[in-house]
């Protein structure tokens, strides 16, 4: 059986259900569209699950099929009602675990509370570590996530964590959608994203720049200093998430002042909370590109500049490789077909 699976895997194509026994993929209520796309790639049907709320606001989960001895994957992302989504995920993990699932993997494209990953002031909580503890205690055996805000969050877990990258999909989008990408400059809107930006710039063989900012308080940007040359070039801002979009919109203005021809923004997680949509509509961006790690259909109707890159093939291939006991490191530098 394993020999057949490995032979199929070496061909690089996603298997169909007949060749993927003992696997179940369940969806939380946060992103059912992504789960459906992942299951389509795997050639299986999503598992039957009912998620609802009692009148007092408590989450209720009913797993509608047997998971005894199965390899279970639960897809839930951190968006909108983030606390409810996290609680629902924990309940689903626990429900599968006590129903004798062989292994439970939480597939969390956008990890909740990822920005609270250190004590940056007195008495500050490290909430990302708390979420890691909760997932482990609920019964998760493995975590699959994408573009963690800080990759050290993997160290908060005592279970395996696969932190996938949107970078291969981003490179593909740049080459296909920006005609003069060879005359571009990859820009990080803050010092923390320098490593991410230099990696993309090296892969494209173009220059990079950095914007240094000083915050007065959270979600408010004070001064911005551009380090690097963007004159007469296409500036591509790259970040891991776009929340209120204050930083990237200020950065776009600063880049245009410095002589950039056009400005694009590429962010893995498009959270778009508060005034983000109106800021994007009033901004100077050619396009704001995000992945569907968070549902984007409504946002794309409200802001025509928002474009979406599908990551379901990356998540689906990661699930297939994990289930078959193969390496997922191929996905760090390639987009699966």
Image (spheres, rainbow, N blue to C red):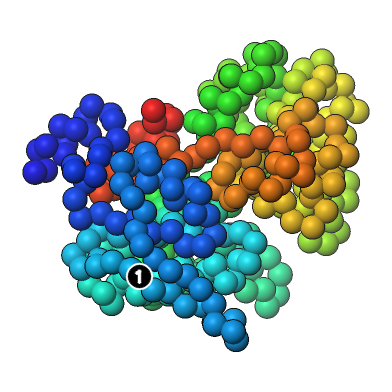
Whether residue 312 can be seen here: yes
Using the image as rendered, state which of residue 229 and residue 261 is in the foreground.
261
Q: Mark 1 falls on what kind of element?
A: strand
For residue 287, which quarter of the picture?
A: top right
Q: Relative to the observer, which residue lies in front, 221 or 47?
A: 47
Place residue 181 in its image quadrant: top right
Q: Which residue is mark 1?
A: 63
Image coordinates of residue 133 in percent, x first then y, are: 45, 72
Visible in this render: residue 152? no
Residue sitting at x 30%, y 60%: 72
Is 92 displayed left or right of 221 in the figure? left
Which residue appears farthest toward the right when viewing the image? 257
The residue depicted at 33 percent of the width and 68 percent of the height is 64
Q: Nearer the viewer, residue 310 or 117?
A: 310
Q: Position of residue 310 (x, y in %)?
A: 53, 37
Q: Quadrant of residue 155?
A: bottom left
For residue 263, above or below residue 299: above
Where's residue 117, x and y in %?
59, 63
- Left or right, residue 110 beside residue 258: left
Q: Whole-percent x and y of residue 299?
A: 71, 46
Q: Residues within 10 Å of mark 1 (few under 14, many from 20)?
A: some
Residue 260 shown left or right of residue 91 in the figure = right
The total number of labels drawn is 1
Left or right: where 215 falls relative to 295:
right
- The answer to whether 42 is drawn above or below residue 64 in the figure is above
Q: Residue at x 39, y 28 (%)?
A: 337
Compared to residue 186, the image places residue 43 above or below, namely below
Q: Residue furthest bottom?
A: 56
Work out which quarter of the rendered image holds the N terminus and state it. Answer: top left
What residue do we see at 43% from left, 59% from top? 27
């Amino acid at each position: 059986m394993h020999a057949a699976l490995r032979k199929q895997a070496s061909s690089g194509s996603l298997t169909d259900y007949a060749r993927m026994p003992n696997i179940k993929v369940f969806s939380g209520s946060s992103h059912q569209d992504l789960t459906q796309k992942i299951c389509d790639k795997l050639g299986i049907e999503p598992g039957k699950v009912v998620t609802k709320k009692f009148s007092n606001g408590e989450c209720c989960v009913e797993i509608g099929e047997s998971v005894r001895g199965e390899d279970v994957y639960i897809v839930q992302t951190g968006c909108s009602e983030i606390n409810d989504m996290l609680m629902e995920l924990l309940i689903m993990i626990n429900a599968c675990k006590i129903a004798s699932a062989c292994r439970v993997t939480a597939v969390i494209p956008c990890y909740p509370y990822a920005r609270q990953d250190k004590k940056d002031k007195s008495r500050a909580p490290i909430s990302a570590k708390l979420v890691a503890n909760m997932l482990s205690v609920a019964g998760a055996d493995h975590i699959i996530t994408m573009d963690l805000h800080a990759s050290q969050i993997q160290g908060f877990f005592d279970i395996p964590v696969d932190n996938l990258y949107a970078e291969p999909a981003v490179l593909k989008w740049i080459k296909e959608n920006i005609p003069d990408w060879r005359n571009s400059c990859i820009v990080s809107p803050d010092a923390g994203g320098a490593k991410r930006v230099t990696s993309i710039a090296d892969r494209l063989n173009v220059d990079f720049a950095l914007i240094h900012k000083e915050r007065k308080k959270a979600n408010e940007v004070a001064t911005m200093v551009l380090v690097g040359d963007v004159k007469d070039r296409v500036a591509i801002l790259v970040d891991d998430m776009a929340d209120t979009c204050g930083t990237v919109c200020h950065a776009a203005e600063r880049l245009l002042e410095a002589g950039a021809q056009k400005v694009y923004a590429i962010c893995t997680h498009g959270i778009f909370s508060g005034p983000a949509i109106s800021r994007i509509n009033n901004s100077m961006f050619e396009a704001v590109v995000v992945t569907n790690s968070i549902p984007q259909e409504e946002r794309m109707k409200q802001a025509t500049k928002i474009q979406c890159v599908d990551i379901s093939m990356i998540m689906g291939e990661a699930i297939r490789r994990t289930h078959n006991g193969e390496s997922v490191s191929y996905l760090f530098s390639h987009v699966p077909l």
